[in-house]
Image: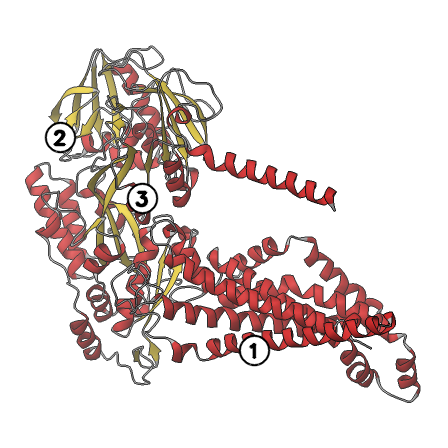
Amino acid sequence: MRKTNILCLIVSLFIAMAVITGCSSGNSESKTTNTGSSEYSGTTFVLGDTTFNAENGEPDINPHNSYSGWACIRYGVGETLFRYSDTMEIEPWLATDYELVDELTWKIILRDNVAFSSGRNLDGQAVKECLEHLVENHDRARGDLMIDTITAEGQTVTIKTTEPKATLLNYLSDPYGCIIDMEAGITEDGIVCGTGPYIAESLETDEEVNLVKNENYWNGEPGFDNINVITITDGDTLTMALQSGEIDAAYGMPYASYPLFENEDYTFSSCATSRAFFAAMNYESEIIKDQAVRKAIAMGIDKEGFVNRLLDGNGYPAVGVYPDTFSFGGDAVTDETYNPEEAMALLEEAGWTDSDGDGIREKNGQKLTIRWCTYPSRQELPLLAEAVQATLGNIGIEVVINCTADIANVVSDKSAWDVYASAMVTAPTGDPEYFFTTHCLDSSVANDGSYHSDKLETLASELAGTFDADRRGEIAVEMQQTILDDDAYVFCSHLKMSMISKSTITGLSAHPCDFYEITAELAPAK
Amino acid sequence: MNPQNVTVRKPKIQKNYTKHKLLFFIILTALLMLAVVFANQLCPYNPNAQIFEPLETPSAAHICGTDRYGRDMLSRVLIGLQTSVLSTLLLVAIITLFGTAAGVLCGYFGGKTDALIMRVSDVCLAFPGLVFALAIAALLNGGLRNAIIALAVVSWPKYARIARSQTLSLKNSDYVFAARLSGDTSVEIITRHILPNIFGPILVTAMLDIGTMMMELAGLSFLGLGAQPPTAELGNMMSSGRSMLQTYPWVIISPGIAIFLAVAVFNLLGDTVRDYLDPRNSGK
């Protein structure tokens, strides 16, 4: 008996020790300076990011690979020739000036005090090599830039396009336009040499990337000696990592966790982005072909309610494609407002009635059931689906949700869905053309619902050949109104993007285009 | 007192105690089942109506608060409990019937059928249960019905094995030989002599399995492979409230308590039934 007691005591002691050591890992300051395998000296900043992973198209930081350019520019490794200001206007970055020689020829003058982290100076030849490699390897860039020839001379690069390309500078400011040293090359891990404030030292896909300060950075002194970006795809893990002090800042925090950080120990940096949560109608579905149904869906979605109740105000109800920070966005267009009564009247008129009293309307024996497909990696989308299920249910439309990570396969089968809700950045280049060329035209790669409009096609070709910014804006408004009048798309909300950092950090600020995160300004608070 | 008397009385007291315990847990289970059957009538509000302020703290109007969509949590927990308990009972019924039938056939007839069915059951037992169920449910595209199918595929071999081993020993007992000599057919022997005698152990296994199955079904739903929205089910309610554990705990705690109570009641009932049917407690 005594032996058992002693044994119990020893076991209890071990458990108590385990609990104490397990719980005490939250003590931050010194811990955050040493994460990962390598030994750091000096100040270290640890960022937890939900998006830096292969599933999201960002397996590494090679801008010529899929969407990895986003990681390259976000983590301060690469920089582009031009960049976006806070008001989304183009301003010089690695370039100092440009000249439009004729409709097809652009002459870009480069900064002369910039060097790659490999030591090589940034000159016309380096830019030429990089862009040539880009269009050779990156399908999206090839289609966007339409580069015919590139010639380099000292600090000047001359780019000739195959067609007039009014938005060339915008596209060159896309993350894939990061200028990297092709002589230094791209390592097997996908590490590149850029001109940014930090240099990538080691990278493990879906795990982390370790960065060190670029001592010879051309535009000021970077604030940290080391930076460690950790991939944390689960929102709850990210929350607890920031709470325990394992990370210093977080990107992609679930809204439900915001109240935990709304105090003086943390800083929020938020701004409106052009990322829109929108639903595309499938024109190959018989039910959706009925415009009354499409209009009723548009009228039956409570955008205000979705933003205020489910996103807790972390978003903006959308009208058209672009948020109101753009001159051609926001209220420049009109759409169907939330009006369940009118939606019901519209459906009645079109012959959709609830004859069997089960709450779901029918017409010619067919139930008004729509298959709403979406995906879970953007946390707002499943919430939107369930909110829509309730409001459309009230007007007699049954919504069956298919929320799957295997979205590409589901969407490619046009018989498997009626409405596809997704989240896309609608103006990553600050210009309206991108959304339409990607989603709404006959030639668009992501025209998932097979939408076609003669009017839109005509306007699109006019937009492509227009260089005047004001006129481009006017055409964009007309194009948005066309797709809204057809009820081909319903734009529900725009994302308010937030990054949360400890209050001991300064200089981490959200940018409307979501490209710039880690910059030379990021530093420990004084 | 004569020591012999003590040894005789002890099992009797034990038996009485078990009987009372059994009665108590049967009453608890009956109450639970009443709540399950009359969940629709007990709900104070429509469980799917998104009409209240989201994330309201528990109050007199909403005893369990509201969720992020502005739905009454108590109504959802009641309906969720109904979904979970009824689907679990259906699942346990399926595996008990199918597993027992397969086991008895194998044990009684033997031969190639026995070898075939037992090898299939070996395959099912070779994988870790929940992981295998997860794979099947994912293959079938999720949904409550498919989650039940997945768990049924994984869980039937246990019953088949118990039924088979019991049948094998009963098959060679004297009364079965006697029945056969007096001209009973195989069907008669199975239904009259074998099934009634293996009923006890199968019942105990099934009772004890209800809690486990409820947890596993809720587990699949938690991972998104069970009930789909807007169906209220305890597992998916806990999953959607997971990120609010620190900020709005009632969203996850109320379905958590419901699942705990239901599983505890079924497990305790199962344990007591086992004690009650245990021959060592028979008092003879």
Say which residue appears at 34% left-offset and 54% top-offset.
Answer: B248
Disc 3 crowd rating (10 Å Cα; few below 14, some 14-19, many 20+) is few
Give percent across and percent down for residue A149. Answer: 26, 24
Q: Amino acid at mark 1?
A: Ile
Which of the 4 quarters of the picture holds residue A156? Answer: top left
Label 2: which residue? A103
Label 3: which residue? A260
Q: Nearer the viewer, residue A133 or A411?
A: A411
Say which of marks 2 and 1 sits in front.
1
Residue B112 is left or right of residue A440, and the answer is: right
Residue A155 is left or right of residue A71, and the answer is: left
Q: Quadrant of the C terminus of chain A?
A: top left
Q: Is residue B282 visible?
A: yes
Q: Secondary structure at mark 1?
A: helix
Q: Is residue A419 visible?
A: no
Label 1: which residue? B27
Which of the 4 quarters of the picture holds residue A413? Answer: bottom left
Q: What whole-number distance in Å separates the C-alpha atoms at marks 1 and 3? A: 43 Å
- Tell me the subunit letter for badge 2: A
Give percent across and percent down for residue A241. Answer: 40, 37
The correct choice, above or below, for A18 with respect to A314 in the image is above
Q: Amino acid at mark 3?
A: Leu
Q: What whole-number distance in Å separates the C-alpha atoms at marks 2 and 1? A: 86 Å
- Tell me the subunit letter for badge 1: B
